């Protein structure tokens, strides 16, 4: 009986506490409150749960991948913001370069940029689940709208 109690408290209970801590840290990280929490979570969780000993090469590779993903996401953010303000712009409603520039950097605050850099695996998963599908849908609509316009013109609509 003492063996089972020791097993439960020492093994099962420890893993559940570690799991709860990981869930809390992941929740904090995914809310973009602290990318540092995610980094700590990965280091501790990888070491204790999977016995992964971080080497300099692994850390450098992770940082380089994060920087590349950060540059990609920031570039997409800038293009989306510019396109949004170009769609809003009319003769009566003009936006200056300074206004759009300010808006770009307001939307990409330090928490968002840190999330793109530190939690890039989750950011990448979110991109493929949402942004990539949105991009494909937009391209599909543009492609199909040309065909629909030709069909409408052939049918006599103006």
Image (cartoon, grey):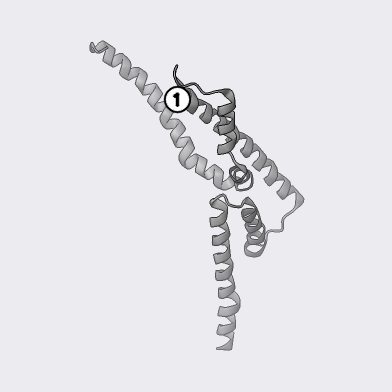
Which residue is at 59% across, 26% downward? 98
Crowd rating for badge 1 (residues with CA inside 10 Å; few <14, some 14–19, many 20+)? few
Single out the residue that lies furthest toward the bottom.
1
* Quarter the C terminus occupies: top left
Q: Measured along the vertical axis of the image, is residue 79 above or below residue 48?
A: above
Where residue 36 appears, as percent x and y from the top left, is 65, 53
| Furthest residue in direction left, as rendered | 156
- Total marks shown come to 1
Q: Which residue is mark 1?
A: 88
Viewed as shown, does residue 141 lie left or right of 86? Answer: left
Q: Of 118 and 43, which appears nearest the observer?
A: 118
Task: Please tell me whether mark 1 sits on a helix, a strand or a loop.
Answer: helix
* Quarter-of-image position of residue 120: top right
Residue situated furthest right in the rendering: 56
The percent coordinates of residue 69 (x first, y second) are 62, 39
Q: Residue at x 53, y 26 (%)?
A: 82
Q: Is residue 58 above or below residue 154?
A: below
- Residue 57 lies, in percent from the top left, at 74, 48
Q: Residue at (45%, 24%) from the top-left corner?
A: 87
Q: Residue at x 58, y 46 (%)?
A: 121
Q: Position of residue 107 (x, y in %)?
A: 55, 38
Q: Which of the image's four quarters has the N terminus?
A: bottom right
């Amino acid at each position: 009986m003492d063996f089972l109690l020791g097993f439960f408290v020492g093994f099962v209970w420890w893993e559940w506490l570690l799991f709860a801590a990981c869930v809390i840290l992941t929740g904090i990280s995914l809310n973009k409150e602290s990318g540092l929490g995610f980094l700590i979570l990965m280091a501790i969780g990888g070491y204790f749960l999977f016995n992964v000993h971080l080497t300099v090469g692994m850390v450098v590779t992770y940082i380089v991948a994060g920087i590349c993903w950060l540059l990609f996401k920031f570039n997409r953010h800038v293009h989306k913001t510019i396109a949004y303000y170009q769609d809003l712009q009319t003769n009566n409603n003009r936006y200056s370069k300074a206004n759009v520039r300010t808006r770009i950097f307001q939307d990409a605050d330090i928490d968002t940029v840190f999330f793109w850099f530190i939690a890039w695996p989750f950011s990448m998963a979110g991109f493929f689940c949402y942004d990539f599908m949105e991009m494909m849908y937009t391209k599909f609509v543009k492609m199909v709208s040309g065909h629909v316009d030709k069909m409408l013109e052939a049918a006599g609509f103006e």
